[in-house]
Amino acid sequence: MTDQPARWTQATIYPDMWADPDDDPRDGEGVSPDGELATLEDFLKNYRITLRMKCEGLDAEQMARRSVPPSTMSLLGLIRHLVEVERDWRNWITDGDPVPKLYGKRDADFDGAVAEQAEVDAAYAALEREQAATDAALAAHPDLGERVGKDGIAIRELLVHRIEEYARHCGHADLLRECVDGRVGQ
């Protein structure tokens, strides 16, 4: 006997998927976006939706549940981490003083992820705020080849790195969610 939850899905067409294709908010009808910038923004949007899908329907305890020791990773920790990451990307765009960390010292985003609904709500609100602020900062630079900030990083590189960061953490979220309640991802 094991204390691990049985694998499950809400999908009825493909049992290894998170949602049926008709119910998947990431899958749009029609052609893909035109142009490199629109394509990159579409990928980022879909990974952001995926992360939220992986967290939906969970209570504060489940959101804060840690993975296997010694890791401090949790779904709530991932949300808080991405808040910090969004803030940090704005630091790469500007020549000014860096925006300070919201949660404090290194790994405080994961270490401070506690099972309180107020903390979960605050993390989601902070993520929305920081995503919007970084989106706005990048929108001021529509030329993907433009180099910005103290390090002269290309806007294209910032966008691709954001996509990579969300994609990587969506993979973590797949495993974390399956450990919480057995729900499998796609």
Image: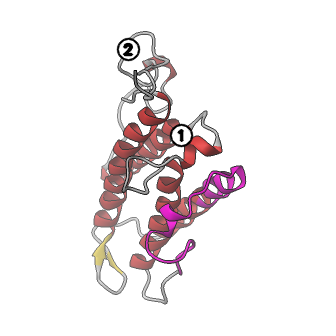
The colouring scheme, among rainbow, by chain, secondary structure or one colour, is secondary structure
Q: Which residues are magenta?
A: 100-126
- Residue toward you, 119 or 61: 61
The quarter of the image holding the C terminus is: top left
Is disc 2 placed on a helix, strand or loop? loop
- Amino acid type at circle 1 is Cys
**Residue at x 47%, y 59% (from the top left corner):** 82
**Image point (64%, 39%), residue name:** 59
Q: Which residue is mark 1?
A: 55
Q: Is residue 71 magenta?
A: no
Q: Residues within 10 Å of mark 2 (few under 14, many from 20)?
A: some
Q: For this view, does 127 lie left or right of residue 26?
A: right
Picture quadrant of residue 104: bottom right
Q: Which mark is residue 15?
A: 2
Q: Is residue 123 left or right of residue 70?
A: right
> Which sits in the foreground, 145 or 151?
151
- Where residue 43 appears, x then y in whole percent? 37, 45
**CA–CA distance between discs 2 and 1?**
19 Å
